[in-house]
Amino acid sequence: MTNETVTIIDDATGKKVQMPLLTPTSGPKTIDISALYKELGYFTYDPGFMSTASCSSGITFLDGNKGVLQYRGYPIEQLAEQSSYLEVCYLLIHNKLPSKVELDEFEDIITNHTMLHEALKRFFSGFRRDAHPMAIMVGVVGALAAFYHDHMDIREPEHRIITIQRLIAKMPTIAAWSYRYATGKPFIYPDNSLGYTENFLYMMFAMPSEEYKPSPLLAKALDLILILHADHEQNASTSTVRLAGSSDANPFAAVAAGVAALWGPAHGGANEAVIRMLMEINNSGEPLQNFVDRAKDKNDSFRLMGFGHRVYKNYDPRAKLIREICHQLLNDMESTGEQKKLLETAMALEKVALEDQYFVDRNLYPNVDFYSGIIFLAMDIPMNMFTVIFAMARTIGWISQWNEMVSEPGYKIGRPRQLYTGAIDLEYVPVDKR
């Protein structure tokens, strides 16, 4: 905070209004326009809120120009290399890294709350057998409010923590069961002897008729993906959770709204789009270079999915971290048939993007969605589960942002304004005279 101000002058009246200029810990200075309507009767116009700070937050910082991403001040590179997803969850909730005792206690709480209420199994059965797993997840997450309503006083910090722990613990079970139901497979209950990501893989792929042991490398890759997707500042789904929660809606409803927003292909479907693009390239029978040339042609609608980023104008820092384990996974696994061809095409595209001057000059490097899509493909995770796993990872970010908002004294219900461009003062005409 500083004493700097920005002066707004109304040319029509000559009236001057001084707006405080806020200085963040890092990032662009921000003009506080909250008095603009009160003093001058004006709104601001900013479609998509591209230049508007909707809140103040101390959770996640990113600098797209420099390729920086930090959780609670810790660089994503350090967390990815040295931490675990559950430790990152603790950090986002409590604004500090846990001690060994605190982390052990937290992991124990999460492990012992992964079970869903047995009656929720019947809720799953209400969906069509071919329902999309994201449709199931939206419904089941919202329904948690009907099963766990004993600690939903949002004004009570202890209740908020209990709800946060429940969501972190139960989201992998909901995600896995959404997949099992959509594929007609029996539900697999959580195994408390397994870690967080191992347990998810177990519930996804185990069968009652045979033993299943999650691969340590797959679990490590998945844990990294969860860390890299845990939070990403005020994106569409996070803003949705905050807006829904600002009405004092229960946290399960707010998170369900976030799941719904993430389901949009422009937000959470990027890694699925990568695999569909690889399929399109392979099924065409055309040389890869044809598609590269098309991507360079501004008059061609074809785009290489998974390259570049809307926010990061430099290399996506998450992509650097996930690339190494992606290559490690591909080197260790045995793929055959269609999967092998898709992975070979993906690696050929990566080589082009990293070496072709056209892509280098435009910073069109492979992003986190490119590599996560390939990893999911290598793990035999179906495409309709990609966004489900994204939602599982982002739950901690959503609920931490919600908790931060409702912890603030005097927070207000969200009420965006509009620039009205419709008709005005029309006279109603009775139906028999139209």
Image (cartoon, rainbow, N blue to C red):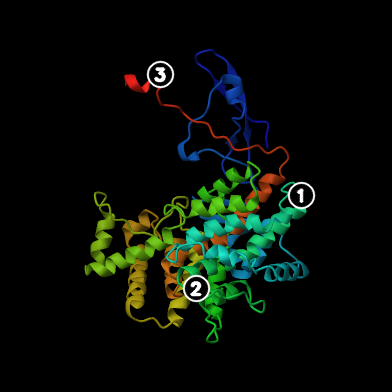
- Closer to the observer: label 1 or label 2? 1
Furthest-bottom residue in this view: 210
Please give left or right for residue 98 compared with residue 268 in the image: right
- Number of labels in the image equals 3
Distance, label 1 to label 2, CA atoms, is 41 Å
Residue 214, given in percent of the width and then of the height, sits at: 55, 80
> Are circles 3 and 1 on residues that touch, CB within 8 Å?
no
Q: Tell me which numbered mark, 1 or 2, is placed earlier along the sequence.
A: 1
* Residue at position x 58%, y 48% in the image: 241
Q: Nearer the viewer, residue 11 or 193?
A: 193
Amino acid type for the residue under numbered disc 3: Leu
Nearer-the-camera pick, 106 or 148: 148
Residue where numbered disc 3 is placed: 426
Q: Position of residue 135 (x, y in %)?
A: 48, 58
Q: Give the quadrant of the N terminus.
A: top right
Q: Quadrant of residue 159?
A: bottom right
Q: Residue at x 69, y 45 (%)?
A: 406
Residue 310 percent location from the top left of the image: 44, 50
Q: Secondary structure at mark 2?
A: helix
Location of mark 1 (residue): 156
**Which numbered disc, 2 or 3, marks the residue that appears first in the sequence?**
2
Which residue corresponds to mark 2?
325
Mark sitting earlier along the chain (3/1): 1
